[in-house]
Image: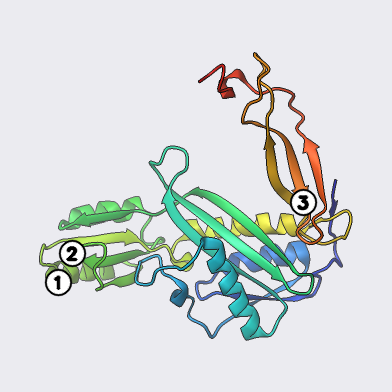
Amino acid sequence: MQTTSSEGGAYQGRRVALLTQHGKERVIAPVLGTALGCRVERVVGYDTDLLGTFTREISRSGTQLDAARNKARIGMELAGLPLGLASEGSFGPDPYTGMFPWNVEMIVWIDDTLGIEVVGVSSGKANFSHLLTANWEEVERFACAVGFPEHCLVVRPQQQEDARIRKGIADWKTLREVFLWACGEASNGCVFLETDTRADRNPTRMERIGQAAQDLARKLCSLCPICDAPGFQLAERVPGLPCEDCGAPTREARAEIHRCVRCGHQVTVERLEKAAAAGRCDRCNP
């Protein structure tokens, strides 16, 4: 169905621009350098917070992927390179129960020489939490629960949208000082705390970015059997695997379609499983 790139492939020795101000090169560069032989080079000279902040001072325009593309393009322009990549994260409730914080990380790879774009993705539970309190003991319990000081904190007086903000709090002495400051500033005496979700202040998120880099590397190492371009990958799943009891088509995938991001060549691969469990059937288990 596909071939795998090896040493001396399309990106061996190539320079790749990575625009980041939050240390993401630490987990991205080693993965892609080992898998592709490329040189990921950190690009500076642009404040990526202007494209949106997790602490809500600046809203992100467009989708998560749009933001990653924008960052990659800016980095490519600043570095004068035809290859670039950038990552963007998002946080919200988990897609299964809606009860747990969830982090989705995307890394987009843009190759203007081949005219392709490939996206690596990883998602999972996040270290993303908040607390509104006027009590220092509650602050201590919250901080310990979210892995402080390895995971940094953000503090505001009064409520979560207050413009007065202290970020990157990374030690207990500073946290106590900022807590007292925020209490004094707040008309309600309360302090709003949340985990700092910038990559270099949140090891859990940084690990997720590394996993997205691994997904990207796997996709870039998968070559199209027709045009030999990197990024021959799963594009869609075809539903309709029959129920093991009644034989009716279910929403479970019966096949996967792998497609080239460059020439569009695709291959349909039937699943090895011949039937879906009755519990996955809308007729047997409505």
Secondary structure of the residue carrying tag 1 is helix
Spatial CA distance of label 1 from label 3 is: 57 Å
Badge 3: residue crowd in 10 Å (few <14, some 14–19, many ≥20) = some
Query: From the viewer's perspective, is residue 173 above or below residue 285?
Result: below
Q: Give coordinates of residue 278: x percent, y percent.
A: 60, 18
Front in this rendered view, residue 133 or 172: 133
Secondary structure of the residue carrying tag 3 is strand
Compared across the picture, whether 181 is left or right of 264 comes to: left
Of the numbered discs in the image, which one, if any, rests on residue 8? none
Identified at 62% across, 76% down, the residue is 73
Residue 281 image-quadrant placement: top right
Upstream in the sequence, badge 3 or badge 2? 2
Query: From the viewer's perspective, is residue 151 above or below residue 126?
Result: below
Q: Hey, what amino acid is under mark 1?
A: Glu
Secondary structure of the residue carrying tag 2 is loop
Colour pattern: rainbow
In the image, which is nearer the foreground, mark 3 or mark 2?
A: 3
Badge 2: residue crowd in 10 Å (few <14, some 14–19, many ≥20) = many
Identified at 69% across, 61% down, the residue is 118
Q: Hey, what amino acid is under mark 2?
A: Gln
Query: From the viewer's perspective, is residue 227 above or below residue 1?
Result: below
Compared across the picture, whether 1 is left or right of 236 comes to: right
Q: Give coordinates of residue 215: x percent, y percent.
A: 66, 54
Query: From the viewer's perspective, is residue 145 above or below residue 274?
Result: below
Q: Which residue is mark 2?
A: 158
Q: Which residue is mark 1?
A: 185
Q: State if disc 1 and disc 2 touch (CB < 8 Å).
A: yes
Identified at 48% across, 80% down, the residue is 47
Compared across the picture, whether 115 is left or right of 47 comes to: right
Q: Which residue is mark 3?
A: 259
Residue 11 image-quadrant placement: bottom right
